[in-house]
Amino acid sequence: MTNENENAILPPKTCSVEKLITVKTDVEKVLAGEKTATRRNGRYADPGEIMTLEGRQFVVDKVYSQSLGELTDDDARREGFSTVEEYKQSILAYHPGMPWLPQMRVWVHEFSPVQD
């Protein structure tokens, strides 16, 4: 079950918000408004933190844990893909040899543009 209420009891970050989105195609999707979430093995940001991509700012709205088996096509669309299968194939291409385990938990970081 997705637990979007974990924000109150988040563990320490494992990385920094500057490293949340670094792949060029992902940066382009964010800037085009096609990507509004990213999943990582660790926690890279706190809610309210600002991520800057090519001079544009995005605020992290939510951070929560989710298992890969819980992903829906809506989740995949927020990641910038049409379906879970398309998202899965992209992730496995980035990480050759990594298994896709439905029970594996990842950290979801949802974000939106900072309004001027």
Image (cartoon, helix red, strand yellow):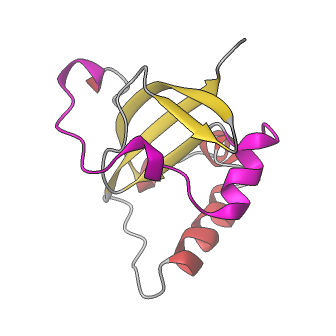
Observer-nearest of 8 and 87 = 8
Question: Which residue is at 21% across, 30% downward?
Answer: 10
Figure quadrant of the C terminus = top right
Q: Is residue 5 above or below residue 13?
A: above
Q: Position of residue 31 (x, y in %)?
A: 76, 41
Q: Is residue 88 visible?
A: yes
Observer-nearest of 31 and 56 = 56
Q: Position of residue 84 (x, y in %)?
A: 63, 57
Figure quadrant of the N terminus = top left
**Residue stretch in magenta:** 7-35
Left or right of 116? Residue 5 is left
Magenta stretch encompasses residue 100: no
Q: Is residue 34 visible?
A: no
Left or right of 58? Residue 65 is left
Q: Position of residue 39 (x, y in %)?
A: 47, 50
Question: Which residue is at 69% across, 43% downward?
Answer: 35
Q: Is residue 74 above or below residue 47?
A: below
Q: Is residue 75 above or below residue 26?
A: above
Q: Is residue 53 above or below residue 96?
A: above
In the rendered image, the residue lying farthest to the front is 55
Magenta stretch encompasses residue 16: yes
Question: Which residue is at 75% across, 49% downward?
Answer: 29
Question: Which residue is at 40% across, 80% downward?
Answer: 98
Residue 36's image quarter?
top right
Observer-nearest of 77 and 38 = 38
